[in-house]
Image (tube, helix red, strand yellow):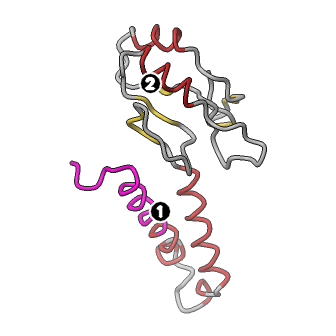
Amino acid sequence: GSIGGVEDGVVGNGEIADPEECAKITALGVDFLAAGIGNIHGIYPANWKGLDFEALDRIHKATNNIPLVLHGGTGIPITLGVSKININTECQLVFAEATRKYIEAGKDQQGKGFDPRKLLAPGAQAIIDKCKEKIELFGCAGKG
């Protein structure tokens, strides 16, 4: 399978992974496995077909319950063996929104508001807040 969209110059169409192929890959000794289940990088379009949770369950069982990674996990609450969820697009979106608000409010033109440490601070804080939210949502709070 593949993760749909484009990342690092690699283009994927979001094909569903074959559980037997996933089992062969895990037999090589990997610690985690990222398998395509209809997930995509970036913002999910209106015509998105959704995730194939049945395929995820088959992959989880075929790979002897190896921890799974979900790329393109922005906005998707999920378990079924998933131990790592990538939410970078969601972090990028809140960063852009907070930075845009700072500039649209004219704060970059007040005093030394153009200083990158000040200009980028709202976006950085937005990412921190989003990560804290996800830590709670994914049940990771208090686990070291």
Q: What crowding class fits label 1: few (fewer than 14 Cα within 10 Å), some (14-19), or many (20 or more)?
A: many
Residue at image mark 1: 127
Q: Nearer the viewer, residue 49 or 3?
A: 49
Q: Mark 1: which amino acid?
A: Ile
Mark 1 or 2, closer to the camera: 2
Q: Which mark is residue 1?
A: none
Q: Residue furthest right?
A: 47
The location of residue 41, given as percent across then percent down, is 63, 41
The location of residue 124, given as percent across then percent down, is 47, 66
Q: Quadrant of the N terminus?
A: top right
Q: What crowding class fits label 2: few (fewer than 14 Cα within 10 Å), some (14-19), or many (20 or more)?
A: many
> Magenta residues?
126-144
Report the side of 31 relative to 54 (left or right). left
Residue at image mark 2: 33
Q: Please determine whether, in this image, residue 30 is positioned above or below residue 47.
A: above
Report the side of 19 relative to 134 (left or right). right
